[in-house]
Amino acid sequence: MSTNTRINLSPARVPVLFLLAAVIAAVLFGGTPAYAATDALRCATFDDLTTGTRYTVGNRFASALEFEVQPFTWTSGTTTSAGYVEVSSALGAAGSGSELLVNNANVRLLLPSPSGVSGLNVRYGEYGGNVNFAVNGDLRNVENFALLDGVVVGGARVSVTGGLGHDSGEIQIVGAIASFAIGGQEFFLDDLCIVKGELTDPVDPQHPDRRPDLGDAPDSSNAGAITNTAYAAAGTPGRFPTVWGSTVAGSAAGPKHLNDRIEGILGRGVTAEADAEPPAADVDLINNILAGGADVANNDRMDDGWR
C-alpha cells in the first residue's frame, strides 16, 4: 500500500452531477462547469488557485469556500502529518481546470456554526491506498468509497458513483452538515458544492426514490392517452407531453419537478442542433432523445438529461 505517491492519470469518463437549489442551475458548456454562487449554492472549483501551489498540514486556503489541510489516517490506524495538498491540472477527478491533488492528507471544509448546510456534492478520483471520509465528526476509514454508498454517516445519507478503486466519481451528501472532511493517499478532489436551506418539497409519487426527472417527462398515457405525433414522419410515436390537460381522473399526470434531492443531471457538453428530430441526426450523429423506435434515451451523456 502506498504511503507517499504522486500520480498523473487520465480520468475515466463519468456523468456530470450538479446540485440545484431553488432556481439556481449548474450549466455545462464546452466541458467547463459554470456555477452561480448564491446564499443557497456555493461551489469551490479551485480554478482560481495557482497550479503547483502546495499546502501542508495546518495550512488554510480558499476558493469560494475555506479549507484546511489535516492529518491523514492510514488503514492501520496510524496518523501521518507528512502529507500535502497540491493544486493540479491532471483532471484525476474528471472535472475541468484546476483540482486538488491530495497526498496522504485530509481536506477539511471550514464551516460556520451553525452552518445551515443541508447538502454537499463533490467530484473525486481515487487511485490507490485507503480513503478518509468524515461528516459531523463521524470518521470512516475505508479502502474504497463504494463501501459508503447508501450509508448514513454523521446523520447524513451518502450516495456514491464509482468508488471501486482506481477510478473517479462523485459523492453526494443529503442531510444537516456541520463539518466535513475527505482525503486519501493517491487522491484528487474537484468541484465541491454546498447547499444551504431546508428541503421541504413533497416527494413525487411517480419518483418515490426522489431522483430528478429533468429531461424525463412522463409517458403520454398519463395525459388521457393523447397521441403525440411530433415524430410521425420517422414512424416513431413521440410520448413526451408536457401539460396536465386531459388527464384521466385518478391517474398520475403531467411532469412534476418536486425533487427534494437537489440534483440535476446534465452531460459533458451542450450541442447546437440544426434539427434534432428523427430522422435527422444530431451533431454527435446520434438521436439522443429517441433511440430507434423505442422511445428510450441512448444515454450518450450529452444534452439529453438521461443517465
Image (spheres, rainbow, N blue to C red):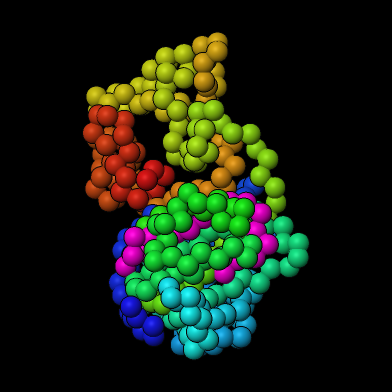
Q: Position of residue 5 (x, y in %)?
A: 36, 84
Q: From the image, which quarter does the C terminus lie in?
A: top left
- Is 174 a magenta residue? yes
What is the x, y in percent for residue 235?
24, 24
288 displayed left or right of 221: left
* Residue closest to the eye, 62 or 304: 62
| Quadrant of the drawing holding the N terminus | bottom left
Does any portion of residue 20 appear in the rendered image? Answer: no
- Residue, x 46% and y 56% (percent of image)? 148
Task: Look at the magenta stretch and give its main secondary structure.
Answer: strand
Q: Residue at x 66, y 72 (%)?
A: 110
Task: Please state if 114 lies on the left or on the right of 46 as rendered.
Answer: right
Q: Residue at x 31, y 27 (%)?
A: 231
Q: Residue at x 48, y 49 (%)?
A: 150
Place of residue 103 in the rendered image (x, y in percent of width and height, measured from the top left): 44, 81
The vertical placement of 50 against 173, above or below, is below
Q: Is residue 78 shown in magenta?
A: no
- Give, as a single range, the part of the protein colored magenta: 163-181
Number of numbered discs overlaid on the protein picture: 0
Q: Looking at the picture, tell me which residue is in the foreground, 126 or 16.
A: 126
Considering depth in this image, is 29 or 154 the residue closer to the camera?
154
Task: Give the farthest residue toward the top.
Answer: 249
Side of 165 relative to 28 (left or right): left
Q: Is residue 270 above or below residue 60?
A: above
Taking the image as shown, residue 297 lies to the left or right of residue 151, namely left
Given residues 222 and 14, the one toward you in this image is: 14
Query: Residue 63, position in %: x, y?
Result: 59, 75
Compared to residue 170, the image places residue 212 above or below, namely above
Q: Can you see residue 231?
A: yes
